[in-house]
Image (spheres, helix red, strand yellow):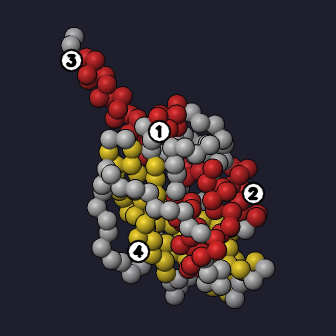
Amino acid sequence: MTGRPSRTAALCVAALAAAVLGGCSTDHHHRSTPSPSGPTVSAAPGPGGPTASPSASRKPTASPSPSATGYDNPQSVATAYVGAFVEQKWSDSGPRAYLDRIAPYATAAFVKKLRDGTGDRCDLACRGAKKRHVTVSADNIRTVIPEEAPRTPTKVWVQVTYMEHTSWDDGGDSAASAMNLELVKDQGKWLVDARMGAG
């Protein structure tokens, strides 16, 4: 019977790691919003470069600054949005914390849609992530506007690829990810109005 507690502990750690890497809960922002209907755009990576290797001691990247974002360039806004969307800190108040981070880069209607579709309950897995100091961040963010993507003077689809890094007290992991964003020109600024992929 002495093997049972360590086996049980190992299974608990594995279950927690799976829950953390899969998201805090079904209410978590990465899993809560259905993909919008709209044109399908390939999620193939754009021009790439070397990617970072996983590191347990990796520090999360800083949140993008709205004042440093070029709102006249949809790719610049898409980059800032992805950094803010992916970022998750164990100290966040709850699953809706990301909404304040993405608000400068998204239309008010899109933020409202996400808020309405995202629960703010921090369940057992979420509390476990907080206890283990889980953080999630993105870097190596690359954007491209595919030639075949629908585009008008006030609407464009941007393909985004990035490395998503998850770290916790005694470990970490990284994975390549991608999403497609629809940006619209709103009061002279490009803003995200829909998302497909990565959640």
In the image: residue 135, left or right of residue 14: right
Residue under label 4, please give it: 45
The residue drawn where x is 28% and y is 61% is 53
Q: Is residue 161 above or below residue 150?
A: above
In what quadrant of the picture does the N terminus appear?
top left
- What is the secondary structure assignment of the residue under circle 4? loop
Does residue 39 appear in the picture of this structure?
no
The residue drawn where x is 28% and y is 18% is 5
- Sequence-wise, which precedes: disc 2 or disc 1? 2
Residue under label 1, please give it: 129
Name the kind of residue labelled 4 in the image. Pro
Residue under label 2, please give it: 112
Does residue 101 appear in the picture of this structure?
yes
Between disc 3 and disc 1, the foreground one is 1
In contact (CB < 8 Å): disc 3 and disc 4: no
Residue under label 3, please give it: 3
Between disc 1 and disc 4, the foreground one is 1
